[in-house]
Each structure stands twice: as C-alpha cells, then as structure tokens.
Image: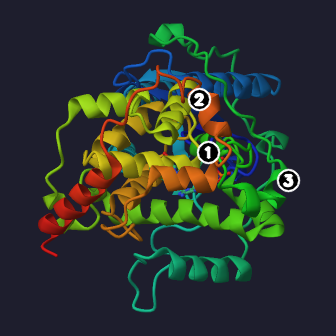
Amino acid sequence: QVNIFWFRRDLRFIDNTALSYALKENSPVLPIFIFDREILDKLEDKSDARVEFIQRTILQMNEKLQAKGSGIKTFYGQPEEVFKTLTSTHKIDAVFTNRDYEPYATSRDRAVEEYLKENGIGFYTFKDHVIYEKEEIVSGSGTFYKVFTPYSRAWKAKYTEHPPHIHGDSLTNDNWFKVEKLDVHSLKSMGFESSPIQIPEKELDTDLVKKYTEKRNFPSLNATSRLGIHLRFGTISIRQLAKEAARLNSTFLNELIWRDFYAMILANNPQIVDNAFKAQYDQIPWRKDEEGFKLWCEGKTGYPIVDAGMRQLNNTGFMHNRVRMIVASFLTKHLLIDWRWGEAYFAKKLLDFDLASNNGGWQWAAGTGTDAQPYFRVFNPESQTEKFDKDLKYIKKWVPEFGTKDYPEPIVEHKFARLRAIDTYKTALGK
Ligand code: FAD
C-alpha cells in the first residue's frame, strides 16, 4: 500500500501543505513528478532555462530523499496515462497534491481525479500556491473583488487576524516509501539541453526588502527580490515569504497581495486567458503589424527605454517591473498591437512567467483588465526615462549604441502614436 504525492508547482520539502498531510497518513509516501508532454512538447526553445531549473531541482530533491532510502519517481508523458501506469504497478490508497488554478491544470486534475475515483483511489488536493483562494476574500455582497485596493484591505484584515499555518520540514518525517535508487529523467532524454541563462538565488535579502519602497522603481538598481521564478515553481513558500514581508515592509507585502489578486481573478474568470476582462475592449481593431512586433521583440524600436527592456528580457529572462509596464504600454498603445501577442512573447521568455500575473499585467497596460490604466493614458517613454532612469544607466547597459549613428530612428512618432491610440480606443469603445 502506498500514498502518492504529486509534485507540480511546489518543489520543496519545507512548508509544503499537501506533502505534510500525506506524510501523516498510515501508508508510506512515494513522491512523483511528471514532465508533462502536453506542456514540454509545445516549447519551441529546447534550451528553455525553466525546464532545466525544474529538472535540476527535482534531481537535488531526489538526492535528499535517497539519503532516506526513498526517491522521486519521474515520468515523461501525459498525466492521465502516467496514472494508468502507476495504478498497474502500485497498490495506491490515495493521491495527494496542491491545487493549481490555471485552466489547463484544473481540467487535467479533473480528468485524473475521475480516473482515480473510478478505480477506488482518493484524490486529495490542498491550498498551497496562494494565501487566499478565489472565494476566500469576497466583498460584502459575496462577490469577488474587481478592484485591487478594497481587495487588499480585506486580505490584510484576514491575514492579520489569522496568519496562515506554516508546516515543518517534510524531510524530518520517516514515512517515505522505500525504493531502490531512482533516476530522474535527464534533459537530453526529453529532447532538451542546458541554457546559458542564470537562475536568481532563492534567498530573500532582508536589507533589500527594507529599502524596497524607495528603490524598487529604478531599473538600474538591483532593488527587487527576483524571487518570481521561485514563487512560480514553489521552491520557496508563499506563506514563509508573506510572513517575512509582513514583518519587514508593507510595500513588499502589497506586491505579494497583487499576486494573490491576479490568481483570484483568473480562477474566477478563466475566459480572460483569451479574452479581455472588460469584454467591450475586444472591439479594438488591433493592427496586425508583424514588422513592428518583430522590432519590439528584438529591442529595435528606436525608443531606448523600450529597447533596453526587451534586450534585458532576451538576454536574462528577466525584465524590471517598471520597464514591463513601459514596453507593454508601448506595444499596445504606440503600436496598437494586440496585448495577446505581447503576453505570448513574455510567456516564452520570462523565467518568472505566471499565467495569472502575466495576463493581469498585460491587460492592465492595455487598459482591458481590472484596475486598468484608463484608455486615454499613454505612457510617454521619454518622461518615464526622465523619472526612472535619469542618468541613462539602465539604457546604456542594454543599448550601448544609443546616441551613436548605429541606433535606429523611432519606428513611430510619439505624438502621432498617442493620438492614434486614443482615437482608436475611443471609437471602438463608443466613448
Ligand atoms: P519583486 O518586486 O521583488 O516582488 C516580489 C514578488 O511579488 C514577485 O516575485 C511576484 O511574485 C510578486 N509581484 C510583484 N509585483 C507583482 C505584480 N504587479 N503582479 C503580480 N505579482 C507581483 N509577474 C510574474 O510573477 N509573472 C509574470 O509573468 C509577470 N508578467 C508581467 C507582465 C507585465 C506586462 C507586467 C506589467 C507585470 C508582470 N508581472 C509578472 C509582475 C511583476 O513585473 C513581476 O512580478 C516582478 O517584476 C518580478 O520581479 P521580482 O521577483 O524581483 O519582484
């Protein structure tokens, strides 16, 4: 008899909710990880740093379990098929896992649950990835919040009253299923290879957090945590991080609340994956400007702050939040290109790519989402530079040819683009 623990976006032993509960049961726990072909086979970049990060993390965790006579059993396949194999080789009591709220994940889990139940096997899921789920913070009338500020107020009140429980280190438990040495699938066996991109450390720099409020908006300073990828794959626990944030800096805590907010918005509105949150914004006749889009992707628009951001993204898998707002506004307003194109490009490139936050960020910039920028607000790249990169340090780092004859002319003139955007939005929205 065995209980299965299924690792997904919670790749850690410390404060892992479902894992802690699984280990308290009678039957020993065999952890598994599925390299999901539905996801991996669609990735164009076969040296995707995120795949390497996951593989390396599983490898390290497997070694830790080997020291306890256990290990992580890995699969490369389609989840439902994997469970069909597992039920033929093991006598399974139940499967434990932490909930994932993305539309693909929820339908995958439904299918797996159905199959397991037909075979008399329990499927137990737990909250772990967020502090509060989609129905835990609701307005007085019982509906979900569509605006961040009242949501964050209710969030903080609940959090202060009942801070979430933090679980211990699962490695101190001995209820692991004993196995012969297990080998983790290699990158090569799945058609992937190593990436030159570096993954940021998972340590929280408390000094940085203390100065976060003053410094976080300046892209040339290394003043944000870079923990995005660790939150994405759960190599750190959101509960531990929020506890630190609450102790150290409320501005930083607020950013973690944005993460919960967008996860809640997506969970309550799965249609926003393909549609504007505010439906009438799907009337905007986006320009199908392939050439402009290519120049934007490559960082060759002739707007140095935009180009610096895109080059930072292409080279490091990261872009500073302030610059994400600027490049997203530029694509959707200056070039009038569909936010979905930009969103898809970010999804390919960002180490910290997270469907809910990425969609939220893009719809905010395009004016189509919750709390969005009003349609007539068009970021001026020059005044943003003046405010946030006055000495051009960030720009010079990523666009060394800026100021020389090799640097291109702007692909569109600012005043013209601004008026065109306002006019197009106005007409489409019937304002
Ligand atoms: P820090 O400033 O150190 O913040 C700590 C953590 O708080 C972040 O890691 C993140 O988990 C959370 N956070 C911070 N700001 C936000 C925010 N505005 N919305 C939601 N969560 C936030 N964030 C992602 O995690 N994944 C994405 O795919 C993503 N795409 C974005 C696209 C656009 C167009 C915009 C404008 C923003 C996007 N963001 C996204 C939000 C934000 O830019 C990043 O979370 C942040 O820059 C990551 O850097 P950091 O880890 O140093 O963040």
| Residue 12 visible at all | yes
| Residue 273 visible at all | no
Q: CA distance from mark 1 to mark 2?
A: 22 Å
Question: Can you tell which quarter of the image residue 17 is in?
Answer: bottom right
Q: Is residue 149 left or right of residue 297?
A: right
Question: Residue at 51% across / 29% down in the picture?
Answer: 311
User: Is the CB of mark 1 within 8 Å of ligand 1?
Assistant: yes
In-front residue for pair 154/142 = 154
Classify 161 as above or below 56: below
Amino acid under label 3?
Answer: Thr
Classify 101 as above or below 135: above
Question: Residue at 50% across / 22% down in the picture?
Answer: 48
**Residues at discs 3 and 1 in contact (Cβ within 8 Å):** no
User: Is the CB of mark 3 within 8 Å of ligand 1?
Assistant: no
Q: Residue 398 — which label?
A: 2
**Residues at discs 1 and 2 in contact (Cβ within 8 Å):** no
Q: CA distance from mark 3 to mark 1?
A: 16 Å
In-front residue for pair 154/248 = 248
- Judge depth for marks 2 and 3 and give the one in front: 2
Amino acid under label 1?
Answer: Gly
The local secondary structure at tag 3 comes to helix
Dot 1 crowding, Cα within 10 Å, few <14, some 14–19, many 20+: some
**Residues at discs 2 and 3 in contact (Cβ within 8 Å):** no
Q: Is residue 324 left or right of residue 411?
A: right
Chain-order first, disc 3 or disc 1: 3
The local secondary structure at tag 2 comes to helix
Q: Residue 228 — which label?
A: 1
Q: Is residue 24 left or right of residue 53?
A: right
Residue at numbered disc 3: 206
